[in-house]
Amino acid sequence: MISFIQISERATVTNALSVALDSIPTRRQLRSSFFEKREVLVVYGSTVSTVQKEYQLLLDSVAVQAAKNTNRRRNIKIKFKEASAVTDAELNTNIIVFIGTPAANPSLRDFTQHIPIKFEKGGIRFNTKLLSQKEHILTLQFFPNPKNHALPFSFLTGNDEYELLQFVKKKVQQFGEGFLFQNMDFEIYERETKIQMGNFDANWFPDKTVFFDYSYGNEIVHSSTSFDFVNHQNAIPKPEVLQLATEIEQTKNRIIAFTNTQKKFPRIGYHIYKTAEDKGLITQNSNQAHLDFSDNTVHTIINAKYSNNYIQKENALVINLLLGKSKSIALERGLALYFTKQWQREGFLYWSARLAESGNALTLSELFDTTLMQQDSPLITDCMAGALVTFLIETFGKDDFLKRYRHWSPSKTELSQLQASWETYLSEQILANPKKVRETKPLSYLKGFNFAHEGYSIYNGYLSRKATEALVKQKEMGVNATAIVPYSYIREGAAPSYLPISYNAGSENDQGVVHSAYEARQLGMQTVLKPQIFIGNSWPGALDMGTDEDWAAFFNYYYRWIRHYAFLAEIHQMDALCIGVEFAIATLTHEEEWRKMIRKIRGFYQGKLTYAANWGKEFEQLAFWDELDFIGLNSYYPLSKNENPTDEELAANFEVVKGKIEKVYRKFQKPIVFTEIGFRSIDKPWKNPHAEGDDSFNAVHQQRCYEVIFRGIENEPWCHGILWWKFPTYLEYRGTENSAFTPNNKITEETVKKWFAH
C-alpha cells in the first residue's frame, strides 16, 4: 500500500495563518476556549437526501444524549444545522464541527485555506498527497477558526457520502458525543482502519516529530479455518503467525468439542500489533488484548514485554459465538480462561492459588456480584473466575455446567452451601500449584526520579517510544531507578466507592506501567511502582471519613485498588511497591488497617514494600514503619523563609531537617529513601517547595536547592536513595524555560549528572 502522506518541507506548503491572524493561538488556548464554552455547532451536509436525513436523526440522538450527561468533564451541549442554512454569524461565533464531503459542505473550503489541503476532482489532497479512494476519511480536530482565531474548528470529511456516513455512525456508536474528540490533530482512515495520523506544530504546520504511518501491513497475511490474520507493520515474523494460527485453531477445536456445539459462526479477524502504543493509536484501545463484537475481531499485542504471557482473548469471542452471552460475568470470563494456557505467564490456577494462600481469594458471593466483577481489579477477578469455572465443572460435571452457563443466577443459599467446597478446592490448588520463589536482589542505593505520565495522547505517555527516550536520557544522567506513578482519583466529599483503575488508552494504564517498567529494566534500572490517588481540590492527607462505617468502606475499596497494582508488580516482577502516598490522617488514625494490608500483600508480592509519608507529622509519627522494607519520605520541608538566603543558610536549615529524619531512622533502624523531593524552577523555591506558586522562571534557584540536598545526604548512613519529583514521559514537555519541577533541559540537569555519577 502506498503512503498517502509524506510530511513535506515547510517551503512546499503556503501557510498564510500567521498573516491572516493577529496572533497565532496555541493548542492549549484553543482547548481552553473549547472547555470554557462547552458548546459546539455541528454543520452537516450531504448531496444525497437519505444521507442528509440520517445525519439529522443521528445528530439529534447525540444531542439528546449529551444533554443527559451529568459528567462535568464531558457535559458538552451539541447543536447542529444543515450546511446550506448556516450563517456567517454562526460560523464566526461558534466552535464548529463540519461533517460532510467538500461538495456537500461548501464552508469547509473557506475554513481550510490555511491548512495544507486541497479538494480536487480526483479526491482530497492533504499535504501534497492525494487521498483518492472512496474509503478514505480525513479528520481534523481543533484548528484555529480563520473567522475567529480564539475558537477552534474541526471536521470529518471524505470522498464518498455513504462511506463517510458509516464512519460517523461507527464513531457515534463507540464514543457517543465523544465522537467529536480524537487523539491526534489530524487522522486518516481507510474505512475504519486508522492508517496515518499526526499533530501540527506551534505554527500549525504538520509536525515531523509527531507523525505515525500505519498505512502498510493492514492486509490479511494468513487465513486459517476460522481466522483471518492481519500482522500490522509485520509485528511478528510470518512463521510465528502460522504457529499462532495453528495453536488458536487447536484451542478453538477444544472449545467446540467441550461445548459439543457445531454452530456455524462468521470468520474472525485477528489483528496483531507490535506495541501498546501502536495498538492504542490505531484502535484507541491499548489493552494487551481486546475484542470487538461488532465485527468479530480480536486485537492483541505480541512482543517481548508479554513473552509467555498470552491471554487468548479470542477464546471469549469463540465461546460467545457458540453459546451466547452468560448472565454471569464470572462464568463468561472464567470459561474463556479455562482454555487459556499461559494467562499472565503462570496460568490462572497458579495465581488463584497465590491469592488463596495470602487470604485474598474472592468468595463465591463476590464472584457472582456483578458490580464487584465490573469494578474490581480485572487481574484478580479474571484469575478467580477461571478457578471458579474449573471448580464448578469438577463439582457439577461438564454437561450440568453448560446447562447453567447462560442463565444461572445462584441464590444466597446455594452460594452459602457451596462456599465450604470452594474453600477446600482452593486449598487443594495451593498444594497443586506451589509458590515459585523469584529472585529478589537487595535494592541498591536508589538514584532516580518519579517518572511522571505527563502526556495523555498515547504517543507521549508511559507506553510510548517517547517514554523510552525519556528513560534513556535519565540513564545517561546516571539514574539507576525509576518510580512509575499511575493515578486514580476520589471526588472530594464523595462517599467511599471503588477506586477506578484506568483503561483509557492515553492514561496511566497497566500497559503503560508494563512498558515503562520493562524498558527501565532493559536499561539496568530498578523499578518502584508507586500508585497515587488524586483528590479534586485537595490531597490524600486531608482525606477524613465521618464514621467508622465509612472508614471501613474506604479501606476495603482502597485495598482492592492497591492490591491490583501489587498483583501487577508481582506478575511483571517489579522491584518495589509503594503501598500508599501521603494519607496523613488515614495512617495516623488507623494503624492496624495498614498493617493488615501490608501483611496480605506480602502473602503474594515478593518485592520490597514501602510507604511514602508526607513530610512533617505523618513521617515523624507513623507507627508501622517496622512492617516495611524501607521508609519512604516525601520531603518538602522548607529550607528557608528568607528571600535571598546564602547556600550556607540553606545547608544549615537542611541539617535541621536531617535531624528529624535521623530520629525516625534511629527508632526503626530501616533505610530511608526520599520517595519524593523536589523544587520548581521558580524564584525562591526553598520557601515552600510543594506549592505550585507563580510562573516565574528561575533555573538557578532550582539548581541551588538540588545542590544543597545532594551535599546534605552524601554519605549519610540512613539514606538509601533519592527519587526526585519529577521527570516527564516526553522530553519536550513544556519546552525549556518552564516553572515545572522537572530539571529536564535546565542547568539542574548537570547537577544531577554530577552527583549521580558518584
Image: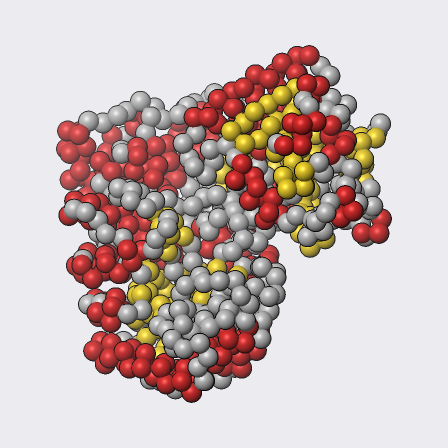
- Residue 304 figure quarter: bottom right
Q: Residue at x 72, y 51 (%)?
A: 203
Q: Residue 210's x, y, as percent?
A: 67, 51
Q: Residue at x 66, y 16 (%)?
A: 51
Which image quarter is the N terminus in?
top right
Q: Nearer the viewer, residue 350 or 285?
A: 285
Q: Residue at x 22, y 36 (%)?
A: 365
As drawn, 625 above or below 26: below
As drawn, 271 above or below 431: above
Q: Residue 473's x, y, as percent?
A: 58, 69
- Residue 436 figure quarter: bottom left
Q: Residue 610's x, y, as percent?
A: 31, 66
Q: Nearer the viewer, residue 686 or 271?
A: 686
Q: Residue 223's x, y, as percent?
A: 63, 34
As drawn, 629 above or below 94: below
Q: Nearer the viewer, residue 491 or 231?
A: 491
